[in-house]
Image: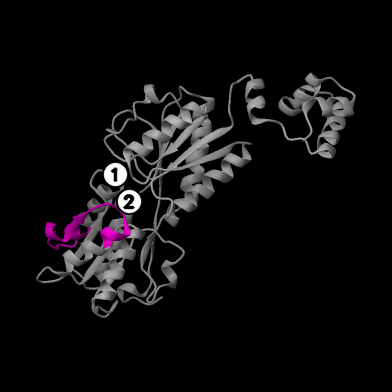
Amino acid sequence: MATLEDVAERAGVSISTVSRVINRPEKVNPQTRAQVEEVITALKYRPSRVAQRLRNKEGHAQLIGLIIPDIQNPFYSEIVRGAEDVAYAQDSAIILCNSDETPSREQFYLDVLKSESADGVLLPPLYNDGSLALDLEQLSLPLVCFDRRITGDPVDTVVVNNRYGAMAMTRHLIRLGHERIGLICGPASLSTSTERALGYRDALEDAGCTVDENLIVMDAPHRESGYTRAGELLRHDPTPTALFAANNQLALGAIEYVREHGYRIPEDLAVVGFDDAPWAKLLDPPLTTVRQPAYEMGSRATELLFKRIEAPNRSPALVTLRPELIVRRSCGAPD
């Protein structure tokens, strides 16, 4: 493997000149820079990231931490792709961590990112009251929250308008004649869950429908919870005529329960979701859902993080993206 010294010797320049070509190319004579770059290409030289960091006058590691709560959820895959594209364009790498919705794991990864001198962290917080160890002074890293928000200390945040999305879906079900709509949400500790529940209630109240609190259930945002909670709701008398699962994993679990217990979708029961995973349109029937701009969320959050790194004292920004109702056949409407 070629070294910095090998490049300098072949190019006939000093080691410091090679270093400037790599780290501060604008400071090098164009002819010399072209000569050194030609040798770098010929020798397939790859500079050490650690060495680059030590030579970087601003101390940037060119590493961004990205913590996601569920690596199996395709919604977060799109966020990761958006974040990675922006980071790559800035010559930075992403360190991807999976918290598994567990505070201890999240704190572990935050500690790892601090020890690796990451430039900043992208994070969907586990609790909307900031009660997890999100002391910003203790974190000592630039932070941008995405998907979920926290209260307390203002932080750069990128979210979708969850209340609007849930309201649009519930209104659509009401227009189709549904009034007893079961809602399966994630835990109340997540801002996404509370906001989607508010949108659901808003739509029912605006339409003059009764809000039956027994038809609102909250649990871990996993497939298993969707299965269990769908069973609970369908044991009510009278039963709901529609189930609204407020994320794609909950929707999968609910659909699994419904099919196992002989319900036909949408003839016996409408089932709708929130998030538009690639598999949603491949189901039979295809799933009516609320599409979130996940890629844009990841890219916008990463852009905000780079702005925060460059200007640590600027005022925090809140970016709210608009979701889209995607109507398919799982609620009885045509494609």
The one of 3 and 243 positioned closer to us in this rendering:
3
Q: Secondary structure at mark 2?
A: helix
From where the camera sits, is residue 289 visible?
yes
**Image location (x, y in percent) of residue 76:** 44, 51
From the top left corner, tell me how far across and down residue 171 is, in percent. 26, 63
Dot in front, 1 or 2: 1
Residue 49, located in which quarter of the rendered image? top right
Q: Is residue 206 magenta?
A: yes
Q: Which mark is residue 162?
A: 2
Of the numbered discs 1 and 2, the one sitting upstream in the chain is 2
Q: Say whether residue 16 is left or right of residue 256.
A: right
Height in image: 161 above or below 132? below
- Category of crowding for the residue at label 1, using alpha-carbon neighbours closer than 10 angstroms: few (below 14), some (14–19), many (at least 20): many
Residue 225 left/right relative to 138: left
Whether pointer 1 and pointer 2 mark residues with C-beta atoms closer than 8 Å, the reply is: yes
Quarter of the image where one finds residue 25? top right
Q: Quadrant of the N terminus?
A: top right
Q: What's the magenta region?
A: 203-226
Which residue does the numbered mark 1 point to in the structure image?
191
- The answer, for residue 317, to whether it is visible in the render is no
Q: Nearer the viewer, residue 318 or 85?
A: 85
Q: Residue furthest left?
A: 237
Of the 4 image quadrants, the one containing the C terminus is bottom left
Q: Amino acid at mark 2?
A: Asn
Reply yes or no: does residue 97 show up in magenta. no
Left or right relative to 181: residue 139: right
Q: Amino acid at mark 1?
A: Ser
Count of all numbered marks drawn on residues in the image: 2
